[in-house]
Image: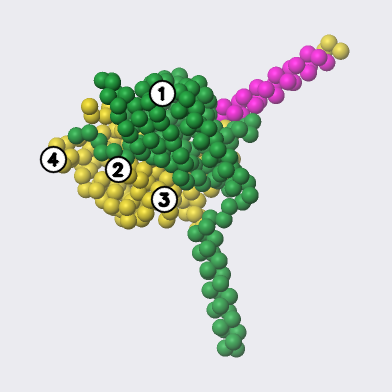
Chain colours: A yellow, B green
Amino acid sequence: MKINQYAGVAVGCLFLLSLTVADAQKTLSKEQTAVEARLRALDAEWSAAAAAKDVDKTVSYYSKDAIVLPPNAPPATTREAIHAQWKKDLEGMVNGSWTPTRVEVAKSGDMAFVSGRFQWTSKDASGKTVSDHGKYLEVWEKQADGSWKCGADCWNSDLPASP
Amino acid sequence: MKINQYAGVAVGCLFLLSLTVADAQKTLSKEQTAVEARLRALDAEWSAAAAAKDVDKTVSYYSKDAIVLPPNAPPATTREAIHAQWKKDLEGMVNGSWTPTRVEVAKSGDMAFVSGRFQWTSKDASGKTVSDHGKYLEVWEKQADGSWKCGADCWNSDLPASP
C-alpha cells in the first residue's frame, strides 16, 4: 500500500509538473507557429513601407474596420481618418521603424497580437529634430480572403511627458 | 434558356450579397457573443477596482506573463513592474474609469481584444488637478483554468502633447 501511495504522489507531481511546463511554454500548434512567422514578416514589411513614406501602402495593412489609437490625438476609426493620421506622421518623419518583440496567436489561428518597440525621428512644427522611442500593441485578424490585416493599433512613447 | 441565365445571375447576386452581409456583420457564434458579454463585465469590474484604488485587485486582472504599455514610461513586463506602475497611477488618481467601445473575439474563443475610452483625473507632482482622457487597447486571453486575463494593455491620451 505504501508503495502505491508513493507512486500516486509521484504521478500527481508529474501531472502538476506537466501542467506547469505546458502553461509556461504555451505549446503552440504548427498553425500558430506559422501565423507568428507570417505576422513577424508582415510587421517588418509594414515598417519598411512607413520608412519609405508610402502612405497608401502603410494604410493598406489595416482591415476595413480597423481602429487606430495614436497618442495625443483622437482615435482614428474611419479609412479617411487613418489615412490622414499616417499622412501627417510620415510627412514629419525623418526616419522611423518598429520591430516586434512578442507575438501571441489564438488557437483558431484567426486572431493574434503583435507587440514591440518603435523608434521615430521627426521634425516638429519649428523644424527641430525630435527623437522618440516607445512601444506598440497591434491586434491582427485573418480576413475572409485569408490575408491578415491589423484591426486595432495602439502605441505610445517611453519618454516622460513634457512638464 | 434566357430565364435560366437570369436565374443564374440572380443566384450569383444573392450569393455575393450574402458574403457581403456576412463580412459586414462578422456573424458571431454563441460562444463569441458570450465571451464578449463576459469581457465587457470584467472590464467594468476592473475599472471599479481601479476607482476604489485597490492596487492588488487591479493587478489581478492581468495574466502571469502580461505586458503593460503605459504612456510616458517604459513597458512593464514583470509582475513587480506592473504592480509599481498601478500603485503610482492609483496613488495620484482623484477619479478614473474606463468603458469598452469595441470587443472582438477569436473564433476559438480563447483570445479577444477590448478597446474603449478612459477618463482620468489626478494630482500632479505640484498638487495641481489634471484631467486627462484617451483610449485603450487590451488583449484578453483565456487561461488554462477557464478564467480570462488581460495579456497585453496599451493606452494613451487624446490631449495634445505639452509643447
Residue labelled with disc 3: A66
Amino acid type, mark 1: Leu
The residue that disc 4 covers is A127
Q: Nearer the viewer, mark 1 or mark 4?
A: 1
Q: Which comes sooner in the sequence, label 3 or label 2?
A: 3
Tell me how far mark 2 sits from mark 1, CA to CA.
24 Å
Task: Give the alpha-carbon distance from disc 4 to disc 2, as whole Å.
Answer: 20 Å
Earlier residue among tags 4 and 3: 3
Rendered residue at 33%/42% (across/down): A70
Q: Label for residue A102?
A: none
Give the chain of mark 3. Answer: A
**Residue type at numbered disc 3:** Ala
Q: Residue B43: image x %, image y %?
A: 51, 36
Does label 1 lie on the same chain as label 2?
no
- Residue on which disc 2 sits: A73
What residue sits 53% from the left and 68% below the top? B17
Left or right: residue A79 versus residue A92 is right
Within-10-Å neighbours for mark 1: few <14, some 14–19, many 20+: many
Q: Which residue is mark 1?
A: B90
Tell which tag, 1 or 3, sits nearer the viewer. 1
Given the image, on which type of amino acid does mark 4 rest?
Answer: Gly
Q: Is residue B32 above or below residue B88?
A: below
Span colored in magenta: A4-25
Q: Position of residue B132 (x, y in %)?
A: 33, 34
* Residues at circles 3 and 2 in contact by the CB criterion of under 8 Å: no
Query: Crowdedness of circle 3 by 10 Å Cα count: few (<14), some, many (20+)?
Result: many
Dividing the image into 4 quarters, which one contains the C terminus of chain B?
top left
Mark 4–mark 2 CB contact (< 8 Å):
no
Neighbours of disc 2 within 10 Å: few (<14), some (14-19), many (20+): some
- Check the image and report above or below for A109 versus A119: below
Which of the pair A5/A62 is nearer the observer? A62
